[in-house]
Amino acid sequence: MVICALCNNEFKSITNVHLKIKHDISFNEYRTRFPDAELGEWYTKILNSNRDKEKNFLRSKKVVDSRIKHGTNIAWNKGLIKEIDPRVSSGPWTEERKLKRINDYATGKIVIWNKGLFGDPRLKWSDSVRKKMLEKYILGWLPNYFLGRGLQGYRDDLNHFVRSSWEANICRIFKYLHIEYEYESEKCRFNLGDSIYTCDWYLPEFNMYIECKGYLYQDSLNKLKKVHALFPDIIFKVIDFEVYRIFTERYSKLIPKWETYKRRKM
């Protein structure tokens, strides 16, 4: 267990969701303010993998510099400067360049390579690429939007509708543990003034509200902050990818109809 340096509460890992909702700071800001604070097992693995990646990059750079020094494998842009060569003179990505690029697309000067392709094998990832992307995501090198949370629909074993495979599996965990729950019921609705926010579950036994978020978009984050501000006395928990990964490791082999999440087709 690790202790949050801002609120002194104990967690298995310091998560980005907790920092954004409770303290309104990012994970990088937390590391900058508290460089010696413990982060937990999950982020320790990510940081170690990133250090290994940096070492490999420096090792590769050293090899390339050595090859250039001895006149082999010289980079095409070695020694070129933007004042004398147009290939490296594009400069920063300004608003003017953005408008020019949009105009080039509109007038047909630039054609998107996958324009008009449907069902083309070039638009699909191979199994090996999917596996590599998933490994990179788990190590923290890719954002959450590379993964989907599965299909919505009615589940016979739950006897009700769910919006994703993640939510279906969490409902199965509640049933497996004999925990009574309400899924998107009237009790799960919060009046935020300008809108109505509906969380995923309410657990009457614990008087707890739970929301499942594979990726915390800014709009969702703003709503969660508003719920926390307007209803400070309620117990509200967020299940993110890290927590769901732990649930998968613990319950996937115990629950018969456990669903594996599927990646969105690219």
Image (spheres, rainbow, N blue to C red):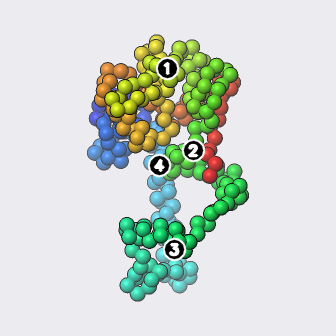
* Residue 200 x, y percent position in the rendering: 49, 26
* Residue 59 x, y percent position in the rendering: 50, 65
Asked whether, in this view, residue 175 is left or right of residue 65, the answer is: right
Label 4 belongs to which residue? 48
Q: Secondary structure at mark 2?
A: loop
Q: Residues within 10 Å of mark 4 (few under 14, many from 20)?
A: few
Instruction: State the CA–CA distance, disc 1 to disc 2.
Output: 27 Å
Instruction: State the CA–CA distance, disc 3 to disc 1.
Output: 60 Å
Residue occupying the point 60% across, 25% down: 161
Q: Secondary structure at mark 4?
A: helix
Label 3 belongs to which residue? 64
Q: Earlier in the sequence, mark 4 or mark 1?
A: 4
The numbered disc on residue 160 is none
Front one among 65 and 265: 265
Q: Nearer the viewer, mark 2 or mark 3?
A: 2
Q: Earlier in the sequence, mark 4 or mark 3?
A: 4
Q: Quadrant of the N terminus?
A: top left
Q: Residues within 10 Å of mark 2 (few under 14, many from 20)?
A: some
Asked if the residue at tag 3 contacts the one at tag 4, i.e. Cβ–Cβ closer than 8 Å, the answer is no
Label 2 belongs to which residue? 147
Instruction: State the CA–CA distance, disc 4 to disc 3.
Output: 25 Å
Q: Nearer the viewer, mark 3 or mark 1?
A: 1
Q: Secondary structure at mark 3?
A: helix
* Residue 108 x, y percent position in the rendering: 56, 72
Instruction: State the CA–CA distance, disc 2 to disc 3.
Output: 35 Å
Residue occupying the point 30% across, 36% down: 23
